[in-house]
Image (cartoon, helix red, strand yellow):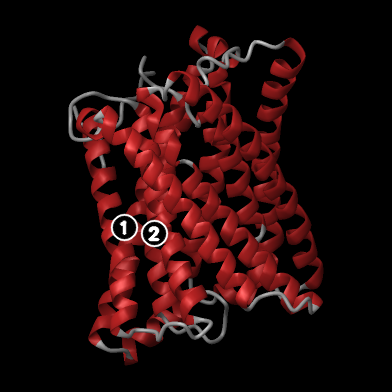
Amino acid sequence: MFYRLPKDTNSDWSPTYFLAALGAGGLAVTFFMWLMFWLPHPDAPVPLFEDAIDALKSGGLISKIAIVGAWAGIGFFSLLHIQLLAWNLRQFSQFRKTPAYQQLRNSNSETQLLAGPLTLAMTINVGFILGLTFVPALWSVVEWLFPIALLAFLLVGAWALALLRDFWGRVLVGGGFDCVKNNNLGQLLPAFATAMIAVGLAAPAAMSQNTVTVTFSLVLSSFFMVTAFVIGAIQIVLGFRAMLEQGADPSTAPTLWIIVPILTTLTITLLRQTHGFHVHFESGAGGVAVLGMLTYFLCAQLVFGLLGWVVLARYGYFARFVTGTEKSAGAYALVCPGVGLVVMIQFFINAGLVSFGALERFSVAYWCLTGVALILQFTTIWLVYRLNRLHFKK
């Protein structure tokens, strides 16, 4: 999957290529789910390096294989994420000097620029996962790291809000938004970016023991979460109206699935906030409400997944842009739904069914359901391999 990426600005480059780095980072997260839900971690709400070492010393063969596999997956896809991020940032720096950039800033596609802060927010998440997985004694200083993480996400959020200010200021004051060309859900990219920032900002609410840190986490993550909901509600209506009038744009049809990772990030944000409210403010949140929320959001993902599959299949999108020879940066939008659904299924099984007694951990039924997530995970890995080979191999 690692290739020598072009150094000069490629005329075919667009901000959508940031999704290649985003997908690689998301796959690192899917391997962290193995540690999160299969590895005992009694001293922290997340698995630590020490927990993995203890399990390697005393655990069974399957446990050891899972830990080594998770380590390999996290390490490999984190490196791939960093390589693709660095390449995209270099390409973006060169792209800003071209007339195509100014043309982009005055079109519907201006919102593609939100792929930058979206990917950087994922980078912060990947960095935290790398620390938990490979750095000894990290939890002893984690309360010092949470404010730094909040600041980092706020800086990325400021970049995202500045881009949204320019776009919404332009179209709401001067007009110029082309509703005819809005026959896709690509305009949901800003909602995805703000949802990714929200889920990062919500992490201290679920893990910190400091009430002040938790309070800041809850307030800041709520702002970006609500922003994602508002933008999403507006653009879903506009996008579907255009598609119902003139059909979906074949080249951007994968955007029909962008709602899947958005719902995953918003669900985890709400789970983290629920935990923070319950532990620090004795709200009594949780229980059936959590299981119900996971069920409803997963069902919504499946609805959009089936809808998107119908459109993509009728256009023959996979035969053209995945297994075929045609190139489209938008094909990388297929990776994020796979990652989002894998993570959501893992949370639904473990934080939902198992936590509330509906399913026994490591039972036959448990592994049958988990097998669905694993099949989807490795299918998404194959998709990344195929797309990288198509787009970057000379």
Answer with left or right where residue 347 lies relative to residue 385. right
The mark that comes first in sequence, 1 or 2, is 2
Please tell me which residue is depicted at 64% across the width and 61% down the height of the picture.
270
Q: Nearer the viewer, residue 81 or 378?
A: 378
Please tell me which residue is depicted at 53% across the width and 13% down the height of the picture.
97
Cα gap from disc 1 to disc 2, whole angstroms = 6 Å
- Label 2 belongs to which residue? 342
Q: Quadrant of the C terminus?
A: top left
Q: Residue 333's x, y, as percent?
A: 40, 37
Q: Residue 357's x, y, as percent?
A: 49, 86
Q: Nearer the viewer, residue 229 or 392?
A: 229
Residue at the outermost top position = 99
Q: How many marks?
A: 2
Q: Residues within 10 Å of mark 2 (few under 14, many from 20)?
A: many
- Label 1 belongs to which residue? 377
Say whether marks 1 and 2 touch (CB < 8 Å).
yes
SS type, badge 1: helix
Please tell me which residue is depicted at 34% across the width and 84% down the height of the picture.
362
Q: Nearer the viewer, residue 307 or 322?
A: 307
The part of the image, by quadrant, that contains residue 164 is top right
Q: Residue 279's x, y, as percent?
A: 73, 78
Q: Amino acid at mark 2?
A: Val
